[in-house]
Each structure stands twice: as structure tokens, then as C-alpha cells.
Image (spheres, grey):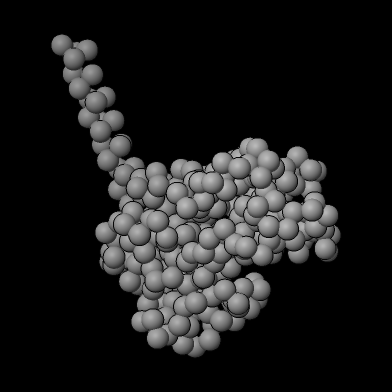
Amino acid sequence: MKKLLALLLCVTMAAFTLTGCGASEDAAATSEGGERTTFTVGFDAEFPPYGYMDDNGEYVGFDLSLAQEVCNRNGWELVKQPINWDTKDMELSSGAIDCIWNGFTINGREDAYTWSVPYVDNSQVFVVAADAGIASQADLAGKTVAVQADSSALAALNSEENTALTESFAALNQFAEYNTAFMDLEAGAVDAVAMDIGVANYQMESREAGKFVILDDYLSTEQYGVGFLLGNEALRDQVQSTLYEMVEDGTFAKIAEEWGLSDVVCLTADAE
């Protein structure tokens, strides 16, 4: 009997402990009045210039700068949460992050998330070595092409309209992130990298001038948005409203200029 009572006591205490932990975690994101105090952004930490770790070990990037300004204006603490891109949906559905904000393509995912309005017009391109003798997509036949796993570029390559192009490759190698893919391009282990044009420009500017070129015929075009859990329109609306405020007072354009992305941003006050 004593053993049974002790067992019941342990089970009760364990249940109380678990309940208490859950309550404290929920409270961490909101104040006593029920208002949000933190905003957790999920991002790929190796996707410059949108989100990455700089030489000082700090997470920076265009999207993170936008998110920080949104937080400043709403009185939230920004939590920068690096994630594995292929597990982003699990991170979002579990509540580990509040949104995916990191060069996140809307096209083809329209019904999978609650989206902000587009804020970047982007294109998928091929980067090749300048001296490789590759001048067009047709020249990629028999070549080895690199792409990031679960990326928009991979989706474009796997689309029906690009079936013939992709089947012409000798191989299509998937990488976890583009830094490694670019190192393989430099070493000659791959012949081309399919990637976002903004990321391509950043990678090329950080390396020897004139060593790489972007093919003139683009793979596809797309738009970036902030992706929230499907149905979370309240948080989306609050973030989006703040972005409009930033457009109207010029802060959005200033941040885009700082990151060299003035030519690709598309958010305007007229979109409101």
C-alpha cells in the first residue's frame, strides 16, 4: 500500500512539473496582460545576404534587419533562430518559431502558409566559372550542377517545364547550403550552381572579381514573403502593417540599400 501511494505521489508530482514547464514556456512569449513580448524568426544561417553569421559570430542579414526593425516598433524582443531548411515546417508547426523569414519563396507554396505580401522579386539563375565555356543553359548538357536541398532552385529544376534541361545534366548534386556548393564550383568539382540571384551576387562579390558569371537565361522568377503558420493571420497582419509603416517612412528602402538589394525589393505602400 505504501508503495502504491508513493507511486501515485510521484506521478502527480511529475504531472505538476510538466504542466508548470509548459506554462512557463508559454509565458516566455507573452506578458502578464497576454501581449506578445518576443518574436522568433526561423532562418537559414548560411543564406547571405538574407541571413547568415558574420565574421564576428553575429547573425545578420537583410531579412534579420527588417525583423529587428519590426520588433523595435512593436516592443518585442527578436529571437534569431537558425534552422535546418529541410525541417522548417516542423519548426513552425511545433511553435519553435513564429515565422520563416529568410528569402522564403511564395510561388508554389501559396496554400501551405499564411503569407505576408511579397517584398522581394527574385530570380533563380545559374552561376558558372567565367572561363568554363558555358554561355547558356544548353551548354549545361553533360555537366554537373549543384543546388541547395529543398530550395526554390531545386523546385524549379524539378518542375515539368524544366524536365528536359534537368535530364540533360550529368548529375544534380544537392547541398545543405550554398557556401559548400560554391567551394565545389571554385574547385571544379561541379560545373554550375543553381541559386537565387541575390545570393549569387553576394557570393560572387565576396570572391575574386570576374571569376564567375551568371548565365543570361534565368531558370525561373519568384517572389519572397514572410511565411507564418497556416491560419495565423493575426500575427501576419501585425508584422505586415509594420512593414507598410517602414515603407512609408523610408526605413524599408534604407535597409534594402544597406544590403545592396534596392533593385529587387517590391513592397510599396500602394500594396496595402
Between residues 145 and 31, which one lies in front from this camera angle?
A: 145
Q: Residue at x 48, y 59 (%)?
A: 104
Give x and y (percent) for residue 223.
Answer: 47, 66
Q: Residue at x 68, y 61 (%)?
A: 215
The quarter holding residue 108 reads: bottom left
Total numbered badges shown on the rendered structure = 0
Between residues 96 and 52, which one lies in front from this camera angle?
A: 52
Q: Residue at x 46, y 43 (%)?
A: 87
The quarter holding residue 31 reads: bottom left
Q: Residue at x 65, y 52 (%)?
A: 138
Give x and y (percent) for residue 9.
Answer: 22, 25
Q: Is residue 30 visible?
A: no
Give x and y (percent) for residue 101.
Answer: 48, 61
Q: Is residue 120 visible?
A: yes
The quarter holding residue 59 reads: bottom right
In the picture, the quarter occupied by the C terminus is bottom left
Left or right: 148 in relation to 214: left
In the picture, the quarter occupied by the N terminus is top left
83 vs 79: above or below? above
Farthest-out residue, bottom = 249
Left or right: 190 in relation to 250: right
Give x and y (percent) for residue 220.
Answer: 53, 60
204 vs 159: above or below? below
Left or right: 133 in relation to 86: right
155 vs 35: above or below? above
Between residues 107 and 169, which one lies in front from this camera angle?
A: 169
